[in-house]
Image (cartoon, rainbow, N blue to C red):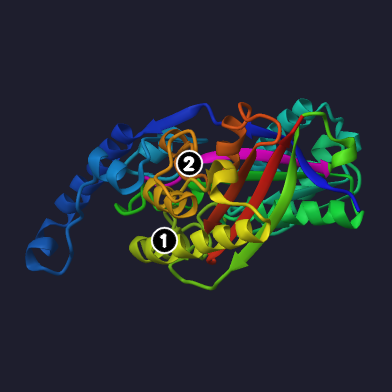
Amino acid sequence: MSTPVISATGLFTPEDSISNAELVESFNRHVERFNADNAEAIAAGTVQPLAPSSVEFIEKASGIKARHVLSKAPILDPEIMCPRLPERPDEELSVLAEIAVKAAQQALAAAGRDAKDVDAVLCACSNLQRAYPAIAIEVQAALGIEGFAFDMNVACSSATFGIQTAADFIRAGHAKSVLVVNPEVCSGHLNWRDRDSHFIFGDVATAILVEAQEIAPETHWEILGTRLLTQFSNNIRNNFGFLNRAAPDGIGQPDKLFRQEGRKVFREVVPMVSTLISGHMADLGLSADDLRRLWLHQANAGMNRLIAERVLGHEASAEESPTVLDTYANTSSAGSIIAFHLNSADLKAGEIGLICSFGAGYSAGSVFLRKAG
């Protein structure tokens, strides 16, 4: 039985970024217009006025300071407040496949791997552009990979679920090299007119090359163990998204966009994830002292701080639990992979770290890694 490892990762970051100040200015213009247009109804008590947002509110609630997006100007236009991504003909590479390919090419180059050497492609993400044909098969074709490919969606935990699936293929002998891509166009499913969530998400794509240890490059990450958990909850929900279904005015209907009960999510997910990690760590014969770094899902700075403290037994330093949330915002399945991609090169051979993601479902996944090289 082959030992699965992570050979390399890749990252695609959109050029455009929206700061909190830019976002707040746009949102508050929308609030002013709405309240002015509905002044009589608001005075009569039949319509609730909208409350403005602020940079201070966003950073206190989330730790987010900016986010990268594929379509900046329309999001900041108070008359639109959503991305405008032109539809492409079926013969043209889709947006999701395009950014996945860019991240994948970086991962393949980092591992010194040719696409023809890859056996399978998994597209593991929250915000799939279409039902079928699978985005993974489109990526497979664009890269010239033989074998098989399929899509999978476990919301923000999709990447860790994808890593375990790829690792299982390696262990079972079904593949030697599996490419897991996590393209996330989260901006298309976000309600940019909702004060409680208009700041949460950004766009990005990551890629993870999972391979049998015997073919991996000298420097790689041995997968010590993976563990997955799901528990049904309506506290984070997305019934569709206006990239797929738009209202007559072209703006997404609130019921079809991302929504969450943030306080409930915080209260319920933190203990669930902390228990998952601690139990998994114990079953692997590891202790908190063995952990060099935690690459946690980048959704909320407060959640990460509390989970890390429960796992490590002390408040984690920025080195122990690095964040990319401040500049990337929540990028769903890609968040923990961005943290790993940008904050792992300094670890020495033999040192151990944890990739952990958690989100809607509820879902959570933990992947313990040991650096080799």
* Relative vertical location of residue 347 with respect to residue 247 in this rendering, above or below: above
Q: Position of residue 308 (x, y in %)?
A: 46, 49
Q: Residue furthest left?
A: 43
Between 340 and 282, the residue placed more toward the observer is 282
Quadrant of the image for the C terminus? top right
Residue drawn 66% across the image and 29% down it: 348
* Relative vertical location of residue 47 with respect to residue 53 in this rendering, above or below: below
Classify 10 Å Cα crowding around label 1: few (below 14), some (14-19), many (20 and above). many
The amino acid at mark 1 is Arg
Q: Is residue 344 magenta?
A: no
Residue drawn 51% across the image and 60% down it: 273
Q: Position of residue 299 (x, y in %)?
A: 45, 49
Q: Which residue is labeled 2 in the image? A: 202
* Relative vertical location of residue 218 with respect to residue 62 in this rendering, above or below: above
Taking the image as drawn, is residue 230 in sight? yes
Classify 10 Å Cα crowding around label 2: few (below 14), some (14-19), many (20 and above). many
Q: Which residue is labeled 1 in the image? A: 259
The magenta stretch is 199-211
Task: For marks 2 and 1, give the CA distance.
Answer: 15 Å
**In this image, 64 relative to 11: left or right?**
left
Q: How many marks?
A: 2
The amino acid at mark 2 is Gly
Between 273 and 79, the residue placed more toward the observer is 273
**In this image, 344 relative to 175: left or right?**
left
Residue drawn 18% across the image and 46% down it: 32
Q: Position of residue 217 (x, y in %)?
A: 82, 30
Q: Label 1's element? A: strand
* Relative vertical location of residue 19 with respect to residue 336 in this rendering, above or below: above
Residue drawn 49% across the image and 65% down it: 272
